[in-house]
């Protein structure tokens, strides 16, 4: 699968978005770690939620940057819990998931950053690095 990023021409913003990384591979409490063990023979899936904390709306999208290559996540999954938490109905569709096929990355350590696009899709915040240890 070729990288398919959306932030290459956008400006990086200081600070951070309101977001959470909930699962990376089989780790369903990903917010507790910065490093993840991943079997090479399994699909890489990363999921969570993200909102534009400045506009208080859903983000413009999410992507993962792994070893410098950007991969767009599917964004807009239903997250009524996030809308309730922030008291903002416009944040209800703030879930994301990125899936990459097994064998995408060689065995070893890989750096991953999460990019959250502003709601107007003119800039992004970047969070990380996270380490993906493929075995």
Image (spheres, rainbow, N blue to C red):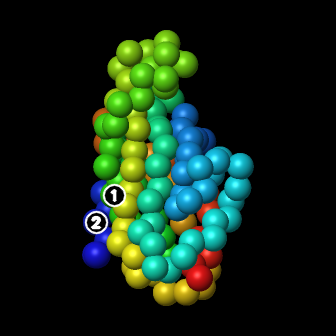
Callout 2: SS = loop
- For label 1, the residue is 72
Judging depth in this view, the residue of 4 and 79 nearest the camera is 79
The residue drawn where x is 33% and y is 57% is 72
> Would residue 68 be visible to someone looking at this image?
no
Crowding around mark 1 (Cα neighbors within 10 Å: few <14, some 14 to 19, many 20+) is many
Residue 83 in the image, given as x and y percentages of width and height: 45, 20
**Labelled disc at residue 56:** none
- For label 2, the residue is 4
Quarter where residue 90 is shown: top left
Q: Earlier in the sequence, mark 2 or mark 1?
A: 2
Residue 26 in the image, given as x and y percentages of width and height: 56, 59
Crowding around mark 2 (Cα neighbors within 10 Å: few <14, some 14 to 19, many 20+) is some
The answer to whether the residues at label 2 and label 1 have Cβ atoms under 8 Å apart is: yes
Residue 79 in the image, given as x and y percentages of width and height: 42, 29
The residue drawn where x is 56% and y is 41% is 20
> In this picture, is 8 found above or below 79?
below
Callout 1: SS = strand
Q: Point out the residue furthest to the top here.
A: 87
User: Alpha carbon of mark 2 to alpha carbon of mark 1: how far?
Assistant: 6 Å
> Would residue 108 be visible to someone looking at this image?
yes
Q: Split into 4 quadrants, where in the image is the C terminus? A: bottom right
Judging depth in this view, the residue of 67 and 38 nearest the camera is 38
The residue drawn where x is 59% and y is 50% is 28
């Amino acid at each position: 699968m070729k990288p398919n990023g959306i932030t290459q021409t956008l400006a990086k913003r200081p600070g951070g978005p309101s977001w959470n990384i909930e699962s990376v591979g089989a780790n369903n409490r990903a917010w507790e770690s910065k490093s993840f063990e991943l079997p090479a023979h399994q699909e890489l899936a990363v999921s969570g939620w993200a909102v534009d904390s400045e506009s208080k709306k859903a983000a413009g999208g999410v992507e993962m940057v792994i070893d410098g290559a950007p991969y767009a996540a599917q964004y807009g999954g239903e997250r009524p819990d996030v809308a309730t938490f922030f008291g903002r109905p416009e944040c209800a569709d703030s879930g994301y998931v990125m899936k990459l096929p097994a064998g995408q990355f060689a065995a070893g350590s890989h750096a991953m950053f999460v990019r959250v696009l502003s709601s107007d899709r003119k800039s992004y915040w970047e969070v990380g690095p996270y380490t993906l240890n493929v075995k």
